Image (cartoon, rainbow, N blue to C red):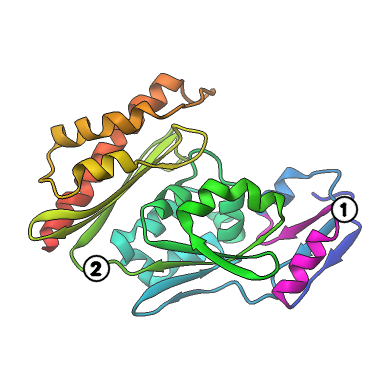
Amino acid sequence: MLRNLKHYKRPTKIEDAVALVQSNANAVYLGGGAWTVAQGDPSLEFVVDLQDLGLDYVEATLAEFKIGATASLQALIDHPDAALLASGLLARAAGYVQSRNLREQGSVGGTLIVADAAEPLTTALLVLDAEIRYADPVVHKAPFMSFVAYRDRLIKARALITELRVRRPPAKSAAGFEVVGRSPKDKPIVCAAAYVEVDEGLPNAIRVAVGGAHAQPVRFHKTEHILSGQFLTSDKVTQALAPALADLLPVADFRGSAEYRLAMAGVLARRAIMGAWQAARRLS
């Protein structure tokens, strides 16, 4: 409940929405509203409603998957192509974000802005060939990995996410996604995503990311470099994960100790890589 709300604007242009927020210190963007309303911040006096900006779409083309920032998480899950793109990775990850009722309300852009260390959609997007677009008020585009690294700067600059684009992967590729939580459908304590492309029986592209074992979801570049071009086995993957795991600084909380999170990061990353590898081989 926003008890002290005094100003409400509903612009029809992206540049107007950004200008309103950037020129008013107490203004915030309102997409789906799931997080903003739940916080009930008593200092919040000004909201800029985004629902007339035309950003509530999920579209599929032959080349890519386009997701508007105010599209709901459930709309992403329900799109027929979401179950096909990269082994259904986006749809599966989005299903772990919240309960169904909150997924009907919460927006994709809002989810990425308030993402915590174990956020599953962010983790999944890190292993896809994803691009994010944002306005400040000029619209820019950047690799999704750069957005994760510089998200706090964009929030401080009060930029507005406008769109995600995910390129369709080639036919001989697959993705894996593994989670551990307090229950099978609970938000993950730790999660891992992997993507593998196969060429002539060997992986010519590997991407792996883990959420919940560092300050934010993180790509395992060292592991990817070691495994590229190698015939994968469980032992090889375990060895290749060691350098990346050594760089993690997990933070303990009531759901899991730092030691537990680090151990699960290794287990889940191995499972995700091997699952993607085996699925991609079946397609080659």
Q: Position of residue 174 (x, y in %)?
A: 24, 58
Magenta residues, start to end: 13-33
Q: Is residue 91 above or below residue 167?
A: above
In the rendered image, residue 44, in percent from the top left (x then y), is placed at 84, 49
Residue 107 in view in this figure: no
Name the kind of residue labelled 1 in the image.
Answer: Glu
Indicate the quadrant where residue 17 lies: bottom right
- How many marks overall? 2
Please tell me the numbered disc located at residue 45. 1
Residue 23 is one of the magenta-drawn residues: yes
- What amino acid is at disc 2? Pro
Q: Along the line of sight, which residue is nearer the eye, 76 or 236?
A: 236
Q: Is residue 93 in the magenta section?
A: no
- Identify the residue shown where x is 61% and y is 66%: 70
Query: Which residue in the structure is indicated by mark 2?
Result: 170
Mark 2, secondary structure of its residue: loop
Kindly state the secondary structure of the residue where label 1 is placed. Answer: loop
